[in-house]
Image (cartoon, helix red, strand yellow):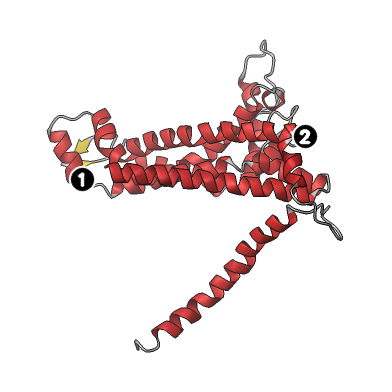
């Protein structure tokens, strides 16, 4: 049995590793190759060296898009994790102690399912729904609730608020998943820890900051990485919801949208690949820095 272990493992892993190498690693290598060409998306192409990256450096729209991705990267993880932690705490510990067992607020099982509903919807469908929520006239849900004497708010047509509207939808769609993730983490924290703290007179705020938050730190780090990578994307919402795919006046432009526009609208697939290379290294650097900081925290602890 032991004699045949390695052939079995090799045979079991060979196919998935080969598929990963062809369809994932191969796709990345092809993107790197195309970023050094003038390929339009059709026909032949010629090498242009680093011209695409020089053009990218001098492209004002790219810097605007990068700034917007930075805005999402700063706020999406912080707000989503804060809301998800609060909800998860209320659903698991917020009801206090009963019969020696900590429990969530009344109806917590129902709330847990309701919070997860947005995760069951495709992001494209979420975008269509919120297009109607943000409707710029009285047919929009929010404007329809305002008094008739008030002027309708333009929301997605307002340069100052359009990107914030996209951020709110991203948070709304993501919170449910992280409520479930943090609830699972809180479920692994021993009941005796909460009971001992409750016997010592710890308040719910103390339970949250002194027990729950430190013991969930690993889950929070994972959530931070996933949300950070999501902040580098946001393509579906920007593509469907915004005026002229990134407008008005590039106020909601992001790097993923620039890749799409250059590849499929402006026929500059080589340039789009160069933007993709930059986006790849930005996401990779963010994940590496986050893991590096977390590792330092673990060592210090």
Q: Residue at x 66, y 12 (%)?
A: 150
* In the depicted structure, whether residue 121 falls above or below residue 67: below
In depth, the one of 49 and 286 nearer the eye is 49
The quarter of the image holding the N terminus is bottom left
Does the rendering let one see residue 57? yes
- Report the number of numbered marks: 2
Q: Position of residue 200 (x, y in %)?
A: 12, 32
Residue 32 picture quarter:
bottom right
- The tag earlier along the polypeptide, 2 or 1, is 1
In depth, the one of 188 and 78 nearer the eye is 78
Q: Residue at x 67, y 43 (%)?
A: 256
**Tag 2 near tag 1, CB within 8 Å:** no
Does the rendering let one see residue 182? no
Tell me how far mark 2 sits from mark 1, CA to CA: 53 Å
Q: Position of residue 282 (x, y in %)?
A: 58, 44
Nearer mark to the viewer, of 2 and 1 = 2
Label 1: few (<14), some (14–19) or many (≥20) C-alpha neighbours in 10 Å = some
Residue 96 picture quarter:
top left
Label 2: few (<14), some (14–19) or many (≥20) C-alpha neighbours in 10 Å = some
* In the depicted structure, whether residue 130 falls above or below residue 9: above
* In the depicted structure, whether residue 7 falls above or below residue 194: below
The quarter of the image holding the C terminus is top left
In depth, the one of 241 and 246 nearer the eye is 246
Label placed on residue 191:
1
Q: Residue at x 71, y 37 (%)?
A: 57
Q: Residue at x 41, y 45 (%)?
A: 292
Q: Position of residue 26 (x, y in %)?
A: 65, 64
Q: Position of residue 172 (x, y in %)?
A: 53, 36
Q: Residue furthest top?
A: 149
Residue under label 2: 244
Label placed on residue 261:
none
């Amino acid at each position: 049995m032991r004699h045949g272990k390695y052939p079995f493992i090799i045979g079991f892993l060979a196919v998935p590793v080969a598929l990963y190498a062809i369809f994932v690693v191969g796709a990345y290598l092809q993107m790197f190759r195309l970023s050094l060409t003038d390929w339009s998306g059709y026909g032949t192409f010629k090498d242009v060296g680093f011209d695409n990256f020089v053009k990218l450096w001098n492209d004002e729209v790219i810097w605007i898009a990068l700034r917007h991705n930075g805005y999402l990267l700063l706020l999406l993880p912080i707000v989503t994790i804060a809301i998800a932690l609060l909800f998860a705490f209320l659903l698991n510990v917020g009801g206090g102690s009963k019969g020696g067992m900590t429990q969530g607020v009344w109806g917590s099982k129902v709330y847990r399912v309701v919070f997860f509903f947005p995760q069951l919807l495709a992001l494209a469908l979420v975008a269509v729904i919120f297009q109607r929520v943000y409707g710029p006239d009285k047919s929009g849900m929010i404007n329809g609730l305002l008094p008739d004497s008030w002027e309708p708010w333009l929301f997605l047509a307002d340069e100052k608020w359009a990107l914030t509207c996209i951020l709110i939808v991203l948070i709304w769609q993501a919170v449910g998943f992280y409520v479930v993730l943090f609830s699972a983490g809180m479920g692994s924290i021993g009941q005796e820890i909460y009971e001992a703290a409750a016997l010592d007179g710890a308040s719910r705020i103390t339970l949250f900051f002194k027990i729950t938050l430190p013991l969930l730190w690993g889950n929070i780090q994972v959530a931070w990485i996933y949300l950070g990578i999501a902040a580098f994307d946001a393509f579906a919402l920007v593509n469907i919801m915004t005026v002229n795919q990134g407008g008005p006046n590039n106020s909601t432009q992001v790097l993923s949208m620039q890749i799409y526009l250059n590849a499929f609208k402006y026929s500059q697939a080589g340039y789009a690949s160069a933007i993709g290379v930059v986006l790849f290294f930005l996401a990779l650097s963010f994940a590496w820095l986050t893991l590096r900081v977390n590792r330092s925290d673990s060592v210090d602890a």
